[in-house]
Amino acid sequence: MNIIISNSSGKPIYEQITSQMKGMILAGELKPHDALPSMRLLAKELRISVITTKRAYEDLEKDGFIYSVVGKGSFVADTNHELMREEQLKIIEDHLNAAIGQAHQAAVSKEELVDMLTMLYEEV
C-alpha cells in the first residue's frame, strides 16, 4: 500500500493515513472486499505506532469505508455512492476554499476566479 507520511504536514499521522486510504477507495484503487494490510504490518511498513494505524482504521470503519472481521482482518466496504459523493464534495469544497483564500491574498476578483475555474473546467 502506497501511503506517504509527512512529518511537516499540519495533519496528525492517523489523519494522513485515513485521507489517503479514503482517496484510494474513492478513486477505485481499492475495491470492495479488498483485504487491507493488518494494523501491525501497516505500522511496520510506515515505521509508526500500531496505535496510530488502529486509530486510522477505527476512523475509516466509523465513516463506513472499511469493515473488520474478527480473526480475518479489515476489508474495503461495499461502495455507498451517496457517502462517496458527499466525501468527494467535501474534498472539492476544501480545495475551493483554499483557492478562494489565495485569491483574496492576491487581490483576484470573484469574476476573475470564476473565469479561471470555467476555463480550467472546460479544458478537462
Image (cartoon, rainbow, N blue to C red):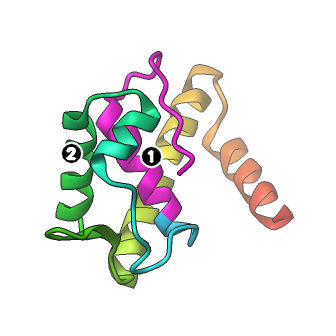
Q: Nearer the viewer, residue 119 or 28?
A: 28
- Element marked by disc 1: helix
Tell which circle, 1 or 2, labels the residue nearer the N-terminal end.
Answer: 2
In this rendering, would 110 be left or right of 122?
left
What numbered label is drawn on residue 54? 2
Indicate which label's residue lies in the foreground, 1 or 2: 2
Question: Which quarter of the picture shows residue 22?
Answer: bottom left
Toward the front, the furthest residue is 71
Give neighbour class at mark 1: few <14, some 14-19, many 20+ (Cα, 10 Å).
few
Percent x, y for residue 47? 41, 27
What numbered label is drawn on residue 108? none
Q: Residue at x 35, y 37 (%)?
A: 43
Q: Nearer the viewer, residue 50 or 104?
A: 50
Marks 1 and 2 sit apart, C-alpha to C-alpha, by 26 Å
Q: Indicate the amino acid at tag 1.
A: Asp
Q: Which residue is mark 1?
A: 94
Q: Residue at x 61, y 43 (%)?
A: 110
- Element marked by disc 2: helix
Q: Tell me if residue 51 can be seen.
A: yes
In this view, 43 is above or below 9: below
Q: Specify start and end residues of the magenta stretch as a single range.
A: 1-24
In this view, 24 is above or below 39: below
Q: Residue at x 52, y 60 (%)?
A: 24
Percent x, y for residue 66? 29, 68
In this view, 100 is above or below 6: below
Image mark count: 2
Give neighbour class at mark 2: few <14, some 14-19, many 20+ (Cα, 10 Å).
some
Q: Indicate the amino acid at tag 2.
A: Lys
Toward the left, the furthest residue is 70
Q: Tell me if residue 65 can be seen.
A: no
Q: Nearer the viewer, residue 85 or 58?
A: 58
